[in-house]
Amino acid sequence: MNSPFANIFLSIQSRIKANAPFIKHSDQDLGQLKAARPAVSWPCVLIALEDFSFTALSENVQQARGTVVLRLAFPPYSSTSSATPQPFAEQALSYYDIEWQLHKVLQGWQPSEVCGRLDRVTTTTQKRNDNYRVREMRYSLAFDDYSTRYEQSFTHAALVIEPVLNINA
């Protein structure tokens, strides 16, 4: 793959698969969680690369800065109200532990040689009308794009050696 975005996505997906076995499904975020019955295995992580901006550097090189968004989703669990027995409340809150473990897999990790390290910026809970729990984790990421760098070309001068005339002879 030539696109840095495709390579970043595949690298993150591979990192999650290798180091976070508690995640049962990962994919691009294409709005799967908007469906009444999302076609995913739980818990899942949906990955999006969002809000990238570009700054010109020299020689037509650009620096890209943006956000890697991970939507960590869980099926409905029991209540966490004060009337809920503690074991059930703890099970209902286990998604925080899974989120924490996933964060430790990604924080400070470098998805490729050409980009910087992931750095967590925010974490929020999505307010939803269904019973699914979705935590949104945002990481900043930057990389330099050399794909349109000016190619320098040089014209080699021809060296011409002419015989030296000896005028004194």
Image: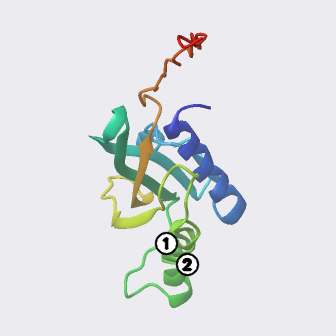
Q: Quadrant of the C terminus?
A: top right
* SS label for mark 2: helix
**Residue 10 screen position, x and y as percent:** 61, 44
Furthest-front residue in this view: 169
Mark 2 or mark 1, earlier in chain: 1
Q: Residue at x 56, y 54 (%)?
A: 111
Q: Quadrant of the N terminus?
A: top right
**Which residue is tagged 1?**
78
**Residue 23 screen position, x and y as percent:** 63, 60
Q: Is residue 122 left or right of residue 3?
A: left
Q: Along the line of sight, which residue is nearer the eye, 91 or 11?
A: 11
Q: Nearer the viewer, mark 2 or mark 1?
A: 2
- Few, some or many C-alpha atoms within 10 Å of disc 2 (few <14, some 14-19, many ≥20)? few
Is 30 above or below relative to 78? above
Q: Amino acid at mark 1?
A: Ser
Q: Are marks 2 and 1 in contact (CB under 8 Å)?
A: yes
Q: Along the line of sight, which residue is nearer the eye, 58 or 14?
A: 58
**Which residue is tagged 2?**
91
**Residue 157 screen position, x and y as percent:** 51, 17
Q: Amino acid at mark 2?
A: Gln
Is 75 above or below relative to 88? above
Q: Residue at x 42, y 52 (%)?
A: 68
Q: Quadrant of residue 48?
A: top left
* SS label for mark 1: loop
Q: Residue at x 59, y 68 (%)?
A: 105
Q: Along the line of sight, which residue is nearer the eye, 16 or 23?
A: 16
